[in-house]
Image (cartoon, rainbow, N blue to C red):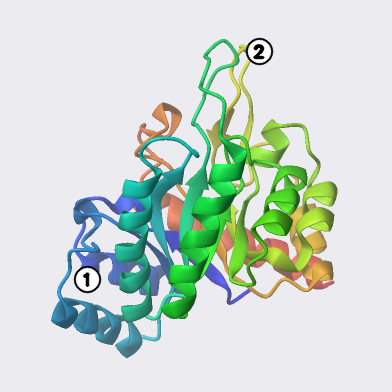
Amino acid sequence: MTRLAFSTLPCDGWSLEEMIQIAKKCGFSAMELREGTNWGISAEMNIQQRHTTVQKLEEVGLTISNIGSSICFTGHEGDQEQLYQFQKVASLASDLKASGVRVFLGYFRNRRDHSVPAINYPQIVKSVQEACDYAGACNVQVWVETHNEFATGKSLKKLLEDVDRSNCAVIYDIIHPLEEDESPQDTIALLGSRIAHVHMKDGMPFEDPMELNWKYTKVGEGRIPISEILRLLDQSGYMGFYSLEWETKWRKELQVPGMEPQTVFPAYIEFMQAGCHTLEK
């Protein structure tokens, strides 16, 4: 498979040159650039820095799939500031020739015994519409990730219908719908052609039933039916990238020896190429 990418999330502190070097060494064809000064790609970059970034990646044949922003709309106070930040990132995405900007919706919650405020759904819809309208002028899409209160295909299908913007699409993070007991068959059937990008990872439930999130593992060592997901996405006509989102920065179980990008990235490429070879048979 040639449509393999990685999020630069675990590469905080690296130079762009170092990220490009590992991408080419491993055989990736695209990079999902995390936005922020720690990752060398920021909405504060001047136009020359943006042009230089594009040039460096184009010289080695790498695509920028999207900008991984941390923007999150909840429908409450703070959304206006988030929208302002989104506008800056959308302009960055346009200058870097990226197809979309990843956004989150709702509240992050790791445990069932932790409470979060109720979302303001109508205002979230309005915020996403405003983001889409601005992004459209930049020729960029808004990619909502399967996460939080919108982790399932069921919840996102309704949101997409209510937002009613052609440039609003979905990042299918394959672990989060499973955490909400929605099968890959249902997620993919519900979202279909609106899936613009896929976040690859693997994991299994924690023993503690209060944990909402699954425990992450190396790809191929968890309980996510990856081969089945690949088959279903292929049948649905999905043509985007399969991007490894390796959350070393957030997940303690990945902050151990043997989980570094230098080890995990080539193993991911090998796993995916072997799996796709089997799929093709």
Q: Nearer the viewer, mark 1 or mark 2?
A: 2
Q: Which mark is residue 147?
A: none
Which is nearer the eye, 134 or 167?
Answer: 134
User: Does residue 268 show up?
Assistant: no
User: Does residue 143 show up?
Assistant: yes
- Residue at the spot of label 2: 209
- Residue at the spot of label 1: 17
Kindly state the secondary structure of the residue where label 2 is placed: loop
Marks 1 and 2, how far apart at CA: 43 Å
Q: Are marks 1 and 2 in contact (CB under 8 Å)?
A: no
Kindly state the secondary structure of the residue where label 1 is placed: helix
Position of the C terminus by quadrant: bottom right
Identity, as a three-letter code, of the amino acid under mark 1: Glu
Q: Residue at x 30, y 89 (%)?
A: 59
Identity, as a three-letter code, of the amino acid under mark 2: Pro
Which is nearer the eye, 174 or 225?
Answer: 174
Position of the N terminus by quadrant: bottom right
In the rendered image, residue 132, in percent from the top left (x then y), is placed at 51, 66
Question: Compared with residue 153, is residue 251 higher up or lower down, i.e. above or below?
Answer: above
In the rendered image, residue 171, in percent from the top left (x then y), is placed at 59, 57
In the rendered image, residue 51, in percent from the top left (x then y), is placed at 22, 84
Q: Residue at x 79, y 66 (%)?
A: 279
